[in-house]
Image: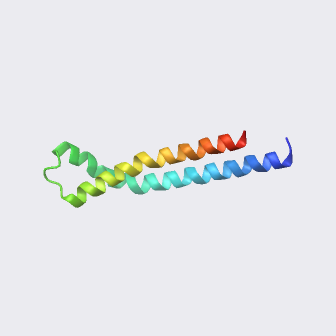
Amino acid sequence: MTSSDVASWWRALLVAGGAFALLLAVVALAAPGGAPLGELLRTGGTTASYDALLVALASAAVLVAAPWCWLLVVLVLVDALR
């Protein structure tokens, strides 16, 4: 393994670690907003305002999209290291 291969692995690990840290930050910020979604589903949305519904759905979308984006970053890094 040459020194450029080792540097490539370290850069890939750094990018993957940064992407994972970003994923954790996004989930930590969106998770408290996801709690109203469960309440909206239990009550059928009859007592919720439009703003609460919008915040709950946006938080749910972020909680689904963030791990998907992290997975794509990892797959691109794996492909780049081949």
Give x and y (percent) for residue 76. Answer: 62, 44
Q: Is residue 54 above or below residue 5?
A: below
13 with respect to 68 (left or right): right
Residue occupying image coordinates x 27% and y 56% = 54
9 with respect to 1 (left or right): left
Residue occupying image coordinates x 48% and y 44% = 68
In front here: 5 or 28?
5
Instruction: Place residue 5 in its image quadrant.
Output: top right
Residue lying at the far top in this picture: please name it. Answer: 82
Give x and y (percent) for residue 11. Answer: 71, 52
In front here: 69 or 16?
69
Residue occupying image coordinates x 27% and y 48% = 37
Q: Identify the image quadrant of the N terminus.
A: top right
Give x and y (percent) for residue 4. Answer: 82, 49
2 with respect to 67 (left or right): right
In front here: 39 or 6?
6
Give x and y (percent) for residue 78. Answer: 66, 40
In front here: 35 or 69?
69
Task: Report the colour scheme.
Answer: rainbow
Residue lying at the far right in this picture: please name it. Answer: 2
Q: How many marks?
A: 0
Q: Identify the image quadrant of the C terminus.
A: top right
73 with respect to 41 (left or right): right
Residue lying at the far bottom in this picture: please name it. Answer: 51
Residue occupying image coordinates x 21% and y 48% = 40
